[in-house]
Amino acid sequence: MNDLISSGFPISFTLGLEAICLALAFGVLFGVIAALKRNKWQDYTAMIIAVVGISVPNFIMAALLQYVLAMKLGMFPVAQWESWGHTVLPAIAVASMPMAFIARLTRSSMLEVLSSDYIRTARAKGLSTPAVTFKHAIRNAIMPVVTYMGPMAASILTGTFVVEKVFGIPGLGMHFVTSITNRDYTVIMGVTVFFGAILLLCVLIVDLLYGLIDPRIKLFGAKKGE
């Protein structure tokens, strides 16, 4: 069991980390663009992409990516885990649904923030749109996304199970699916407990991030007189 985790977890962690980075980067980007270009074609395009990401399961997305980008266009390898190119399609497949949720969260939060009084004040002082967006709006609009990062980690970690099987990636997810097929209850329970511990760690990290992003949040309680 220890050998299985030590050999499979680094692969699953690499895939999950790439998926998280993709989901955060493109989700926030699409959400900000949609909010700034509300009711324009950029907004509609970003939300259509988000709806597709939410609607299509990641294993279906994985098969579509394999067929179109790997088999038809030959841009990436079809399967296996040998080089950086082998990680692109699995990471996109895993990140598609979290990215869509982040885009929708960011858009709704940005729209609320952009209508706030302090944003109007910043604009009245002559600040440019990029300055207002990046210095004031995004930092406050990102809090719902940070809250979602805990469940997102759960979604990505569990979402890699089937995707790893589809792409033939020798990570923990593939071993977990194989153990279910073989009724290997020891592996099933061991991997479940291990992933549960990882998820608790992710939630703890998210809680700590609150204090870094918003100094108004007290992590350890206020001192007397504060």
Image (cartoon, rainbow, N blue to C red):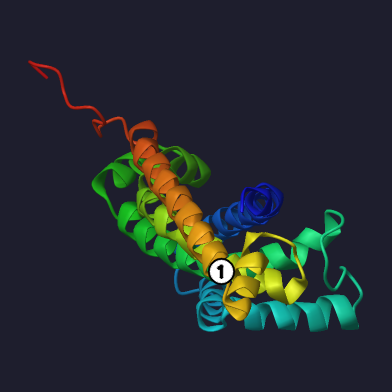
Q: Can the viewer see residue 208?
A: yes
What percent of the width, then of the height, locates residue 196? 43, 55
Q: Residue furthest right?
A: 74
Residue 140: image quadrant is top left
Q: Which residue is rendered at x = 25% and y = 32% of the image? A: 216
Front one among 152 and 167 = 167
92 is higher (above) or lower (below) than 58: above
* SS at mark 1 in the image: helix
Q: Which residue corresponds to mark 1?
A: 159
Residue 135: image quadrant is top left
Instruction: Judge from the rendering whether residue 133 lies leftward or rightward of residue 187; answer left or right.
Output: left
Q: Which residue is rendered at x = 75% and y = 77% of the image? A: 65
What percent of the width, then of the height, locates residue 129? 48, 47
What percent of the width, then of the height, locates residue 211? 33, 33
What percent of the width, then of the height, locates residue 117? 24, 47
Q: Can the viewer see residue 125?
A: no
Front one among 195 and 5 = 5
Quadrant showing the C terminus: top left
152 is higher (above) or lower (below) than 211: below
Q: Which residue is rendered at x = 23% and y = 30% of the image? A: 218
Front one among 175 and 97 = 175
Q: Which residue is rendered at x = 57% and y = 83% of the image? A: 56
Q: How many marks?
A: 1
